[in-house]
Image (cartoon, rainbow, N blue to C red):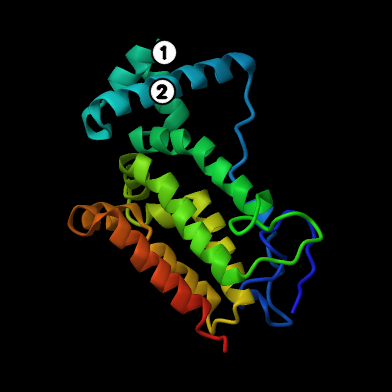
Amino acid sequence: MAHDRSGPQSASAIPPADALAADGPAPVPLELLRTPPPAERADAARNRAAVLEAAARLFAEHGVAAVSMDQVAAAAGVGKGTLFRRFGSKAGLGAALLDARERVLQDAVLRGPAPLGPGPAGAPEPDPAERLTAFVDAYLDYLLPHLDLVRMSETATPGARYQIGAYRFWHRHTALLLTRAATPDPDHDAHSLLATLAAEHVHALLPHLGEQRLRDGAHRLAARLAGAGGD
């Protein structure tokens, strides 16, 4: 059955399971869950760019764990106090580095070609199971090159992963697809699938299973979840 599309909302504006009841909360459009680029003065933007460039270079050269905020501040030519006021901690700095990369993936989900995105306006909507598998692959393509950074941002404090704005986006997108696939509990199942993509989980299993087995396992889980309520 076709669903109406109303703007860039990841396939369609179908609410998650907890919003399907007549008296439930109105669904939040997926576009509104994106992390917006920071609004800042020109000089602050230049300092931010210098800090992020220095951090990316140092992290790539020495590894995330070996780089201190003092080293980043010195390399960027800013004061340590400025760095901490702006980013809060090394985890906050890592999250800022990931923002731009996350926005690229979010754009592809919202507006890109099928099966990762919805495809051109007016075209038949892609199969939700295919979109889910494409998302798993695209997310792993984003995660694996930046695994240490994502791991740091997701484990900085207990439950940090679930408080990151991007997680709400990934979860809502996954839940929307599972709602279209008629799974019994899309919100729960979306969390279950995303748990297999957590940086700490991937970091622990990658040396033992290798990338391809991790991908294959996530594909199988996505297929099972997307087919749970279908024929």
Callout 2 amino acid: Leu
Q: How crowded is mark 1: few (under 14 residues within 10 Å), some or many (20 or more)?
A: some
Q: Position of residue 118 (x, y in %)?
A: 68, 58
Q: Which residue is drawn at 30% across and 41% down?
A: 148
| Mark 2 → mark 1, Cα distance in angstroms | 7 Å
- Extreme bottom residue here? 231
In the image, residue 64 sits, relative to residue 228, either above or below, namely above
**Observer able to see residue 221:** yes
- Pick the front one: 82 or 229: 229
In the image, residue 86 sits, relative to residue 184, either above or below, namely above
**Observer able to see residue 192:** no
Q: Position of residue 160 (x, y in %)?
A: 39, 52
Q: Residue at x 72, y 69 (%)?
A: 26
Position of 99 with respect to 182 (left or right) is left
Q: What element carries label 2?
A: helix
- Pick the front one: 28 or 62: 62
Residue position for label 1: 78
Q: Where is residue 45 in the image (x, y as percent from the top left)?
A: 57, 20
Callout 1 amino acid: Val
Q: Residue 224's quadrant in the figure? A: bottom left
Q: Name the mark on residue 228.
A: none
Q: Position of residue 72 (x, y in %)?
A: 34, 20
Q: In which quarter of the image is the C terminus?
A: bottom right
For the residues bearing labels 2 and 1, Cβ distance under 8 angstroms: yes
Residue position for label 2: 83
Q: In which quarter of the image is the N terminus?
A: bottom right
In the image, residue 140 sits, relative to residue 222, either above or below, namely above
Position of 138 with respect to 203 (left or right) is right
Q: Is mark 1 on a helix, strand or loop?
A: loop
Q: Which residue is drawn at 41% across and 32% down?
A: 93
Q: Residue 6's quadrant in the figure? A: bottom right
- Pick the front one: 84 or 92: 92
